[in-house]
């Protein structure tokens, strides 16, 4: 699929949203991912040095300080030691939004599970959008080796991972029941066999990037479950009950596992977490609301199923989300960041990976994303945003940057226990890794992120490499 074609599809959808969403503007998601935003009060330098920032900022949140922080347990970016990187095979060009570490892979040495093409795909029409209703469209993933990472000035000189087998469809066509085109195959997570299950499972998730056009103000399911060979796919499952504050716009972009001790202490045993940032309200009826999306990243914990044929909604609970102030915080060309719960939020923000990283004494919930430094420019005439990355209709928030943000796990835990509002917890550190190949203000978002708890390795996908429309991906590796 060409970048121009991809952007054209997104642009058409964005233009339609003004009609279908009664004024709720979408972001402009496509080849340039999303972007913008800047850092919070204690943000880090590019090499990870940072101060603390434990109080919410902005006019919407006021000056409420989050409770529960355990400063001495906070993991720092400076503790990560860069090991190098390796390339993903060409099968993952225009893909690798999702990443999961598989400890039993490669005969116990560990492997990575990686999502394939970022859209639903029919193998008879590779890397094309599934607009034709006669096509059999599904979500694909592959398992790859983890070669010894290397440090190289040119990403093309990196070692290349080996894919074990042809990519596997693992949603049984279920994701297309939500929509065939306006979504990304966004993440996956391996879960060992539980309860009466006969095998281990893969959970998959979708990011419905044009949610307003797909479902209007209504919510929608975003998660499914399948065997690792793709069989017995079940879903689609809604994360939590279909009531406020749960909504499909708040979940699906990233998914990861938390340790059992943390799940037991704070989440009533729920070990899987998903989230998303999508800054539109359900209907715009209130100036500040928790209905619909979230103007900042979210965390919703849910319980994995114990059977092979589950039914019903996922048993979920929220422990991070931000209120939507619209148009106050991020309205097109009129929003003011002083009205945002999340500092310097923009409608282009795209958080695509998550992980619970732990050294045994220090820990953090980390989110990987594409954020920037600009305003919420919406290119509706006579406004021209002059975005060097894209001229598609919608929001443009350049310049852009890649970030990894760190949350205090105990502050989040207090939210889960009901001791404070979810929107008062902010990241305490922002890491801008120097090792990414695309620096400055890149036009491409990042991808998935995963943590190897036993080996204490962090895997981070960088997308957008290569000339023209290649969109190749590499995996960066750090150790603790």
Image (cartoon, rainbow, N blue to C red):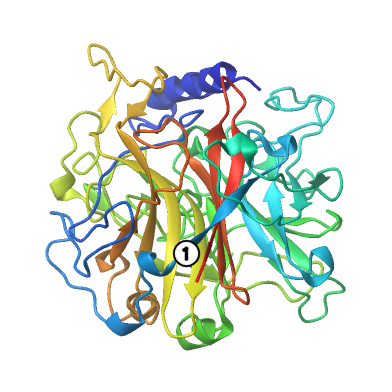
Q: Nearer the viewer, residue 51 or 262?
A: 51
Residue 330, horizontal then vertical, whole percent: 25, 39
Which residue was labeled with disc 1? 81
Query: How many numbered tags mark residues here?
Result: 1
Residue depicted at x 28% and y 81%:
71
Dividing the picture into quadrants, the one containing residue 280 is top left
Residue 91, horizontal then vertical, whole percent: 74, 37
Vertical position of residue 301 compared to residue 461: above or below: below
Dividing the picture into quadrants, the one containing residue 450 is bottom right
Q: Residue furthest top?
A: 382
Residue depicted at x 65% and y 59%:
100
Q: Secondary structure at mark 1?
A: strand
Residue 463, horizontal then vertical, whole percent: 55, 39
Whether residue 24 is visible to the viewer of this picture, yes or no, is yes
Residue depicted at x 28% and y 43%:
37
Q: Nearer the viewer, residue 45 or 300?
A: 45
In the picture, which quadrant includes the N terminus?
top right
Whether residue 427 is visible to the viewer of this picture, yes or no, is no
Residue depicted at x 53% and y 81%:
263
């Amino acid at each position: 699929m060409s970048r121009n074609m991809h952007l054209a599809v997104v642009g058409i959808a964005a233009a339609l949203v003004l009609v279908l969403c009664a004024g709720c503007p979408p972001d402009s998601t496509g080849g340039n991912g999303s972007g913008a935003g800047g850092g919070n009060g204690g943000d880090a330098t590019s090499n990870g040095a940072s101060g603390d920032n434990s109080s919410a900022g902005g006019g919407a949140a006021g000056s409420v300080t989050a409770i529960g922080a355990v400063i001495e347990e906070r993991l720092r970016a400076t503790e990560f030691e860069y090991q190098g990187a390796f390339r993903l095979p060409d099968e993952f060009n225009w893909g690798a939004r999702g990443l999961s570490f598989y400890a039993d892979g490669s005969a116990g040495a560990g492997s990575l599970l990686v999502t394939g093409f970022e859209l639903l795909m029919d193998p008879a029409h590779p890397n094309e959008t599934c607009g034709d209703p006669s096509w059999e469209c599904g979500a694909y993933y592959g398992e790859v080796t983890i070669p010894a990472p290397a440090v190289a000035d040119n990403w093309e000189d990196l070692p290349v991972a080996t894919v074990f087998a042809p990519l596997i469809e693992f949603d049984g066509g279920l994701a297309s029941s939500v929509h065939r085109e306006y979504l990304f195959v966004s993440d996956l997570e391996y879960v060992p066999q539980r309860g009466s299950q006969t095998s281990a499972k893969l959970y998959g998730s979708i990011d419905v990037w044009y949610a307003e056009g797909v479902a209007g103000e209504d919510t929608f399911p975003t998660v499914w479950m399948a065997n690792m060979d793709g069989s017995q796919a079940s879903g689609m499952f809604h994360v939590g009950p279909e009531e406020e504050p749960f909504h499909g716009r708040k979940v699906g972009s990233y998914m990861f596992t938390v340790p059992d001790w943390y799940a037991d202490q704070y989440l009533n045993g729920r070990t899987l977490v998903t989230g998303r940032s999508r800054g539109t309200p359900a209907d715009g009826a209130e100036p500040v609301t928790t209905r619909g999306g979230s103007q900042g990243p979210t965390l919703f914990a849910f319980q994995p199923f114990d059977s092979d044929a589950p039914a019903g909604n996922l048993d979920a609970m929220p422990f991070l989300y931000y209120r939507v102030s619209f148009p106050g915080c991020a309205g097109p060309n009129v929003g003011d960041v002083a009205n945002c719960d999340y500092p310097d939020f923009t409608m282009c923000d795209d958080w695509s990976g998550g992980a619970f990283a732990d050294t045994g004494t220090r820990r953090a919930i980390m989110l990987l994303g594409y954020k920037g430094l600009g305003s919420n420019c919406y290119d509706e005439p006579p406004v021209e945003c002059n975005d060097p990355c894209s001229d598609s209709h919608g929001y443009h928030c350049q310049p852009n940057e890649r970030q990894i943000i760190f949350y205090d796990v105990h502050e989040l835990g207090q939210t889960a226990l009901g001791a404070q509002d979810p929107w008062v917890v902010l990241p305490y550190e922002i890491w801008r890794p120097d090792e990414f190949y695309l620096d400055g203000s890149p036009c491409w978002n990042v991808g998935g992120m995963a943590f190897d708890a036993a080996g204490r390795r962090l895997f981070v996908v960088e997308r957008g490499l290569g000339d023209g429309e290649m969109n190749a991906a590499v995996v960066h590796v750090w150790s603790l």
